[in-house]
Image (cartoon, rainbow, N blue to C red):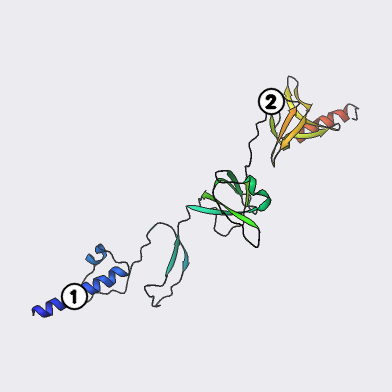
Amino acid sequence: ARQGLAEARIEVRAAEQKLHAIGFSETDLDGLAFHVDSSFLRYVISAPFGGVIVEKHLALGEFVDVEESAFVVADLSEVWVELSVYQKDLSRVRTGQDVLVVDTQTGAEAWGRISYMSPMLDEQTRTATARVVLANDGAWRPGLFVEGRVAVEDLPVEVMVPKEALQTFEGRTVVFAQTDEGFEPFPVETGLENDTLVELRSGLEPGQRYAATGSFTLKAQLEKSGFASGHDH
């Protein structure tokens, strides 16, 4: 009887080790019911971290070996953006720089920072990889094609306005600034610019109020009043 008990304990320990090997914890083992009608056909698979299932390699009734992957779970609260940097731009792009990541299809934008630059170039594309880590609320899906706009230099300017504030009036570039009589066209000299903003080197003073939007309407009204009074400029 003692020998039979010892052999049974050995079998129990071996069975426990097998269950541990496939992911059962001590709490799971303590919760198992050993009686005539017990069934071990249901097995709860718990992921080691929170995320979403991105791949499933399992069908009903399929046998899964301990070395096979039944599911692939990904934590998408942060995503990596891998940008290709051309050889001619490598001297101006480095880790720590701010990057505006743009989804060219939807126009969605998010700011990130370069956390890694590959030390070698791809032999075929002759580009290096810059990695940007983005906080993700679900809008950025792995596999998207995006564009990265790297802030390579900061240049201080005294006056800067949106490009839509500029209009051409009587052959000159103007900005409609506020006066006591309303908005009037002020000739300006432009300087540095990017996709949305432009520097004004002359024409407006810092702090002067101007029409950032709706300048085209102001121009049309001014031209209309000029025609109505018989003045064709």
Residue 19, given in percent of the width and then of the height, sits at 28, 70
Q: How many numbered marks, from 0 up?
A: 2
Which residue ends up furthest to the top in the rendered image? 180
Q: Residue at x 42, y 70 (%)?
A: 70
Which residue ends up furthest to the left in the rendered image? 1
Front residue of this view, candidates 42 and 86: 86
Front residue of this view, candidates 121 and 116: 121
Quadrant location, the N terminus: bottom left
Which dot marks residue 209? 2
In the picture provided, is 3 more to the left or to the right than 150?
left
Front residue of this view, candidates 109 and 87: 87
Q: Which residue is labeled 1 in the image?
A: 10
The answer to whether residue 127 is seen in the rendering is yes
Residue 16, given in percent of the width and then of the height, sits at 24, 71
Q: Name the quadrant containing residue 96.
A: top right
In the picture provided, is 25 more to the left or to the right than 80?
left
Residue 109, given in percent of the width and then of the height, sits at 60, 47
Quadrant location, the C terminus: top right
Q: Amino acid at mark 2?
A: Arg
* Callout 2 secondary element: loop
Q: Residue at x 66, y 53 (%)?
A: 87
- Mark with earlier residue (2, 1): 1
Q: Name the quadrant containing residue 59.
A: bottom left
User: Between marks 2 and 1, how big is the CA–CA gap?
Assistant: 87 Å
The answer to whether residue 35 is seen in the rendering is no
